[in-house]
Image: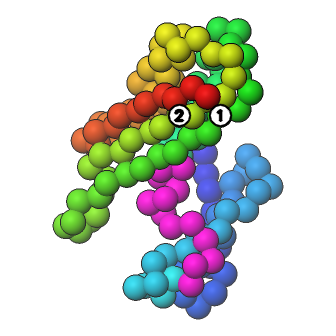
């Protein structure tokens, strides 16, 4: 796996791309280092990676369980320490599900998705990040 970041201005706006997709991702830094709000910040990308990795697996498991999933939204919130580097110390994933879904099956699916199948979770947890999750149906 390889990604390429191309500088887009004289500050810290970059465009990311990978060989697996034609989609470009705009990445920018904070205003403190010259960012101009032209992209997602790197630590936000980490939260997006965790949320997407988890929800991909959750969706797959719920479909295998024959749950009637109308919609899924994921909110991921992280807390960072004050000292530099400002790494995440705690992250909470909220899965908001809509449809005719059995709560016990959804809880089991979420546990498997987050704690067993999500490689981003395992990487962050190995670094000492406390990761929790919750499910809300309808």
Query: What quarter of the picture does the C terminus occupy?
Result: top right
Note whether 49 is above or below 69 in the view shown: below
Q: CA distance from mark 2 to mark 1?
A: 7 Å
For the question of whether residue 117 can be seen, the reply is no
Q: Which residues are magenta?
A: 36-48
Q: Is 100 placed left or right of 79 in the picture?
A: right
Identify the disc placed on residue 102: none
Q: Residue at x 41, y 32 (%)?
A: 133
Image-quadrant location for residue 92: top left
Note whether 109 is above or below 22 in the view shown: above
Q: Secondary structure at mark 2?
A: strand
In the rendered image, residue 33, in percent from the top left (x then y), is placed at 42, 85
Identify the disc placed on residue 95: 2
- Residue at image mark 1: 72
Q: Residue at x 34, y 37 (%)?
A: 131
Q: Extreme bottom residue here?
A: 10
């Amino acid at each position: 796996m390889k990604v390429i970041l191309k500088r887009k201005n004289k500050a810290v706006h970059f465009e990311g791309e990978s060989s697996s997709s034609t989609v470009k991702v705009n990445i920018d830094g904070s205003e403190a280092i010259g960012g101009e709000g032209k992209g997602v910040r790197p630590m936000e990308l980490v939260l997006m990676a965790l949320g997407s990795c988890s929800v991909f697996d959750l969706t797959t498991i719920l479909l295998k369980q024959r749950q009637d999933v109308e919609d899924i939204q994921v909110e991921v919130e992280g807390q960072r320490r004050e000292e530099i580097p400002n790494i995440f110390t705690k992250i909470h994933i909220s899965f908001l599900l809509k449809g005719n879904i059995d709560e016990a099956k959804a809880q089991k699916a979420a546990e498997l998705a987050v704690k067993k199948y999500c490689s981003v979770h395992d990487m962050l947890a190995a670094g000492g990040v406390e990761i929790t999750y919750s499910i809300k149906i309808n």
